[in-house]
Image (cartoon, grey):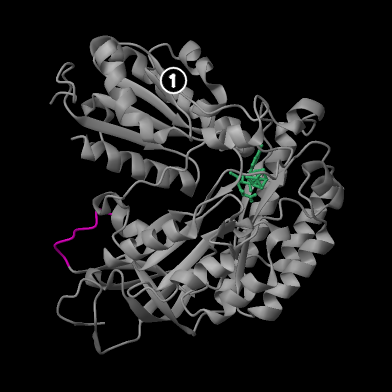
Amino acid sequence: MTTSAETAVHNGKLFIHTVGCQMNELDSELVVAALRKHGYELTADVADADTVLFNTCSVREHAEHKIYSALGRLKYSKRKRPDQVIGVMGCMAQKDQKLIFQKAPHVDLVVGTGQLSEIPLLIDNARENRERQMAISLARRDATRQKVADSFESYDPLRDPEMRPSAFQAYVRIMIGCDKFCTYCVVPMTRGPEQSRSPKHIVQEVQQLAAEGVKEVTLLGQTVNSYRHTENGREYRLSDLIASFHDTPGLERIKFVTNYPRDMTDDLLQAVRDLPKVAHYLHVPAQSGCDEMLKRMKRGYTVEHYREMMHRIHETVPDCSVSSDFIVGFCGETDAAHEKSMELIREFRFKNSFIFKYSARTGTKADAIMLDDVPEETKRRRNNEMLDLQNEISEEDNAARIGREYDILVEGPSKSAVKAGDDDSIPQTQLSGRTRCDRIVVFDGNRRLTGSTTRVRIDDCTATTLIGTIVTRELQHTADGGLPILG
Ligand code: SAM
Ligand code: SF4
């Protein structure tokens, strides 16, 4: 195929590698959708592709190293294939900018999180002119907040249903950026100032997704519960936003991530309690169980604030699952401080915790003024101790569910079914889905149940998964609108 200007020839095959958070997954979905409109076709084999994109993460150094290694591996293939266009997009592009061209001179394109809409044009330019293309937003300290905010565009084009990872689950961005400036975190620099999208646009997007068959939306924001937008003289908070699209026909479940502890307001908890489609699940990272560490991290709350928030969550929504994030080995973290984080996990018995070893990041306050003084070996040990504790708690709490029945929103063949070479000509397979409290459940069933809600009894468990059996031995309506099947 040729580019729009009918000059540079390429095979139209696009390979994209995505790392990082859900925000990145959504960005990749949207970029691929836009490129498909320009005639590109996705390939899973990098060796097949004349256009290669890396959607990157800067939160930890390890993720960046992996991308530089992957770029290094393409150096030789590019020599044999000079028309190939290689692009780096996302957080690392915004953070490292020209450094990417210095470290990997065969890269053609560097595109920050705020310029994703320009990618089709930039690829064309790179290919036609054989010139490097770079599009990034203003740095936070180089201009006023408004100017920097204007340079980060929320990228939410009309979506291509074919590109969604699952036909009935979709991410919806409600905010971009972050203004919290936790001392360890690079996100306020790579994603820019906090900006909430207009409720009108979000509601339209949800309605369109539901009309296309989407049953579950996950609203995305770095601190999603800080959402605020004033439209026609009315202020919308997250609770108002959810209420305004909750009754959309076809929509069955609403989730939102990630929450900031200080912004967990009562109106939001009441919305979780009162609106039947909202999941009883909140991801609210604590990061540490030690006040001294929380202060150094500039998280803006103490352990007592967090405890008070957990109390309100359980008082308002008694069966709510809560998950957390923790950083181990942050600057100055002693064994005693680490033990306080372990104590917090014992006290709140999170559904699960994402645990990260502290990684010093250029551009952050911690990197500038604190000493990364916890040895790697200690970080690793604390990481493992915390993982073991969390797994023990998750398994005990899952075991307490054995014998109970839950309504499961079925997501499709389980990961192990897919790994084992799931054969879609055979209707029966191991399916995976989630309870309203976001617990993963696997069970055997007909793949046509995907997208429907099915009652499952729990027979067994691991730390991460409930294992069950369908209890409905009657005709079930499937999500595809086909003939009902025996559940
Ligand atoms: N906005 C979310 C919040 O505040 O909870 C999370 C965003 S961040 C991309 C996801 C997680 O990465 C954080 O919750 C934190 O635990 C971890 N993280 C961020 N910066 C880190 C760093 N420099 N080293 C290790 N972990 C880090
Ligand atoms: Fe990073 Fe803190 Fe913002 Fe989360 S709230 S994105 S951890 S700065």
Confirm whether the magenta stretch covers residue 424: yes
Confirm whether the magenta stretch covers residue 232: no
Instruction: Pick whichever, 106 or 115, lies toward us.
Output: 115
**Residue at screen point 16% across, 19% down:** 9
Res 140 → quadrant: top right
Q: Is residue 462 above or below residue 4?
A: below
Q: Is residue 449 above or below residue 420?
A: below
Quarter of the rendering occupied by the N terminus: top left
Q: Which residues are magenta?
A: 420-426
> Residue at the bottom extreme?
474
**Residue at screen point 19% across, 58% down:** 423
Q: Which residue is mark 1?
A: 134
Q: Is residue 411 above or below residue 356?
A: below
**Residue at screen point 55% across, 69% down:** 240
Mark 1 residue element: strand
Res 207 → quadrant: bottom left
Q: Is residue 365 left or right of residue 422?
A: right
Magenta stretch: dominant secondary structure: loop
